[in-house]
Every structure is written in C-alpha cells, then in structure tokens.
Image: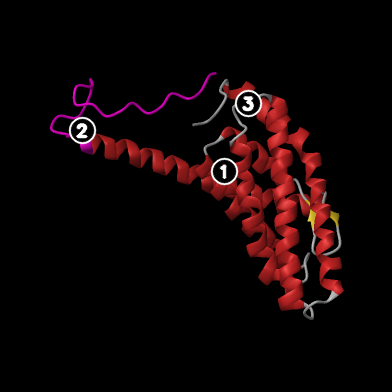
C-alpha cells in the first residue's frame, strides 16, 4: 500500500540537523508540525461537513418529520474521511462539523428550536463514534469497508433512538407516554444514510487515485 511517508524520527546524526539542537528539541519540532497539520485537517473537514449539511439542505435536502429533520450529504463526507484519515481527524471533524451544521440549521429555521437541547448533543454522540467504527475496517477490502459504514449507520440509528426515547419519556413528554416511543421510532429512518455508502466509496477511490495514496496518515 502506498502512503505518505512518515516524519523522519529525530536523530542527532541526521544530515542537515541544526547545530546545537538536541534530539529532544528535534522530536518536539516534528511533533509540533504534526499537531499543526492535524489541527488544520480537523478545522478544514469540520467546515466541509458543516457546509455540506447546510448547502445540501438548502439545495437538495429532503425534509423529514422531527426528529429526523432532513437528509443531507454529510454522511458521505465523514464516511470517506473516516477511511482516509487518522482517527483523531475523523472523530473530531465529524463531531464538530455535525454540531456546527445542525446548529446552523436551527439558526436558519429548518428545525424547531424546541429540539435543540437534545438534537445537538445527540448528533455528536451518535455520529462521532461512527468514525471510530469505520476506521477499524479501513485496511480491509471494499466490501468490509462498506460493511463498516453500514455498521456505523446502524449504531447511529440506535444511538438516536434510545437517547430520544429517554428524553421524550422523562424530559419532553409526559413520563411513560406512548407518544414518546412513537416519536423515537421515527429515528429508525436514519437508516436512510445507508444510501450514501456508494457515494463515500467513490469519493475514497477518487481521492486515492488523485493523490496516489491509500491513507493520509
């Protein structure tokens, strides 16, 4: 597999090392460059996921009844990022981008504000672990990668379902209300995100072909 070359390890015998610079200071310099790169990647992909959420809602979004809101292209984006990039990048990009994107939908009036206290924290805890699930399949065959994406979507669906059921039962609707379960069952519609798996696989293949790499590690 082709991949970006790792940063060379600090060594006092390396050619071109700065005179008087200790091995520890070289290690710190390499680590700082890596941290800066990861921070830039997280920032960029968070913005991409948030923008994808809002723009696809504005132009292509399919409205759904609460608590589902709309169908957006965001899952295809974080699915692909979870395959191509390290866990720290995909996890935080998915968490931050999803929260910002959903917050913008609230601000634009696409979702009733009464749902904000549960929707924004809920989307973070339901979506961000998807990146970790998909990551575990990234070095396997395409079929296994697709399976990982499907498994992540199933996790997301039930994460939404159980958290919403609890919230509607004990915080939003009368305790023990059958309406709470009925409303939470609508979360099963999150499985519609499975349709984005082929799109994500195409994105992964296109990026790998364009940059001639398997992973951006």
Q: What residue sits 22% from the left and 38% below the top?
A: 25
Residue 118, quarter of the rendered image: bottom right
User: Which stretch did the figure color magenta?
Assistant: 1-24
Q: What residue sits 66% from the left and 62% below the top?
A: 122
Disc 2 on helix, strand or loop? helix
> Which mark identifies residue 23?
2
Question: Furthest residue to the left?
Answer: 20
The residue nearer to you, when weighing 10 against 106, is 10
* Magenta segment includes 166: no
Residue 159, quarter of the rendered image: bottom right
> Which mark identifies residue 90?
1
Q: Earlier in the sequence, mark 3 or mark 1?
A: 1
- The correct choice, above or below, for 129 with respect to 103 in the image is above
Q: Decide: marks 3, 1 in contact (CB < 8 A)?
A: no
Disc 1 on helix, strand or loop? helix
* Magenta segment includes 15: yes
- The correct choice, above or below, for 23 with respect to 75 in the image is above
Labels 3, 2: front one: 3
Which residue is under mark 3? 140
How far apart in space, not on screen, are marks 3 and 1 (Cα)?
A: 18 Å
Magenta span: predominant SS is loop
How far apart in space, not on screen, are marks 3 and 2 (Cα)?
A: 37 Å
Q: Earlier in the sequence, mark 3 or mark 2?
A: 2
> Which mark identifies residue 172?
none
């Amino acid at each position: 597999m082709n991949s970006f070359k790792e940063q060379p390890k600090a060594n006092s015998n390396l050619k071109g090392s700065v005179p008087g610079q200790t091995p520890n200071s070289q290690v710190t310099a390499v680590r700082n460059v890596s941290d800066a790169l990861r921070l830039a990647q997280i920032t960029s992909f968070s913005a991409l996921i948030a923008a994808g959420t809002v723009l696809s809602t504005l132009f292509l979004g399919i409205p759904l009844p609460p608590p589902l809101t709309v169908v957006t292209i965001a899952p295809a984006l974080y699915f692909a990022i979870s395959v191509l990039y390290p866990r720290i990048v995909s996890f935080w990009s998915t968490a931050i981008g999803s929260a910002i994107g959903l917050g913008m939908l609230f601000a634009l009036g696409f979702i009733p504000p009464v749902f904000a206290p549960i929707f924004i924290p809920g989307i973070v805890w339901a979506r961000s672990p998807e990146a970790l699930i998909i990551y575990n399949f990234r070095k396997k065959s395409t079929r296994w990668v697709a399976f990982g994406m499907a498994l992540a979507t199933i996790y997301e669906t039930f994460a939404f379902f159980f958290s919403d059921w609890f919230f509607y039962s004990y915080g939003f609707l009368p305790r023990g209300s059958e309406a709470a379960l009925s409303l939470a069952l609508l979360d099963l519609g999150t499985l519609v995100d499975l349709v984005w798996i082929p799109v994500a696989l195409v994105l992964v293949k296109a990026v790998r072909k364009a940059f001639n790499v398997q992973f951006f590690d």
